Amino acid sequence: MDGGDPSFVPLRRSHGRRRIVFLGPPNSGKGTQAARLAEALGIPAISTGGMLRAAVESGSELGGRVKDIMDGGQLVDDAAMADVVRARLAEADAAQGFILDGYPRTESQVTTLNEILAERGEPLDEVVLIDAPDDVLRARAALRRAQEDREDDRKEIVRKRLSVYRRQTEPLIEIYDKQGLLRRINGDRTIEEVGQEVLAAVGADRDFVD
Ligand code: AMP
């Protein structure tokens, strides 16, 4: 601050106390970008898909219930997801803010999240939408299939997950757009390029200027 423009005050608003939702189709890169932004902001990235995969791997009761649904590319029911998200957001590290990656995915989940936020007395700050054309998403899935051999990367499951997204989750875009919360990002670029735009979209790019 010494010697510079006296009106320039480095913005630190992005640190903590931010509640951000990431929306986007499978293979849009939203998980990668949510994790990067969380790291930059010092808040947790909460991936509901990651939590459910961990539940399946641990052999928990929840894992047993959701395995076939996930393998089939379908959505886990809203009531089960409400329990998962409520419990996770009640943990200490989420008190100072969080990024939700993969939740909400249905209109009912939007309602649940609104209830949770109202109970906390905290509004949502931004909804970051990372999108890319279907052919790009399919090509990325094919690449991953070749590299990782993950069950939900199988061709017909990829198609299913994409159609579930377009039908059940895409309507959320309009809901959040109407609330003025939506930030649209073109995900058909490099991780670095998309990452820069994500930082700018949530006003965090200015935070690291000193
Ligand atoms: P993801 O890694 O976010 O693509 O999630 C992997 C899978 O977990 C999805 O295909 C769904 O079966 C399930 N899942 C994750 N998040 C949700 C959610 N919010 N609602 C319902 N199912 C979910």
Image (tube, rainbow, N blue to C red):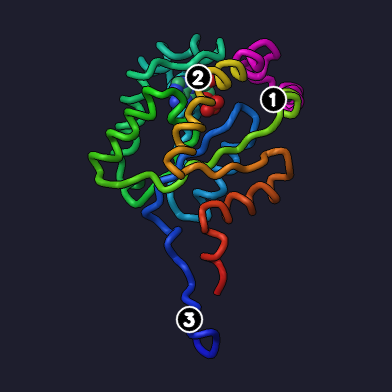
User: Helix or strand or loop: what does disc 2 sit on?
Assistant: helix
In this view of the protein, can residue 54 be seen by the observer? no
Among the 4 quarters of the image, the one containing residue 80: top left
Residues 176 and 194: in front is 176
Q: Main secondary structure of the magenta part?
A: helix
Query: Badge 1 is on which residue?
Result: 148
Magenta stretch holds residue 156: yes
Q: Nearer the viewer, mark 3 or mark 1?
A: 3
Residue 65 against residue 195 in the figure, above or below: above
Q: Which residues are magenta?
A: 139-160
Query: Badge 3 is on which residue?
Result: 7
Residue 21 against residue 85 in the figure, above or below: below
User: Helix or strand or loop: what does disc 1 sit on?
Assistant: helix
User: Helix or strand or loop: what does disc 3 sit on?
Assistant: loop
Kind of residue at badge 3? Ser
Going 34% across and 52% down the picture, which residue do you hit? Answer: 96
Mark with earlier residue (2, 1)? 1
Kind of residue at badge 1? Glu
Residue 184 location (% of width, % of height): 59, 42
Mark with earlier residue (3, 1)? 3
Query: Badge 2 is on which residue?
Result: 168
Magenta stretch holds residue 68: no
Kind of residue at badge 2? Gln
Number of on-image labels? 3
In this view of the protein, can residue 49 be seen by the observer? yes
Residue 78 location (% of width, % of height): 37, 19
Q: Is residue 78 left or right of residue 11?
A: left
Residue 19 location (% of width, % of height): 40, 46
Q: Residues within 10 Å of mark 3 (few under 14, many from 20)?
A: few
Residues 137 and 57: in front is 137
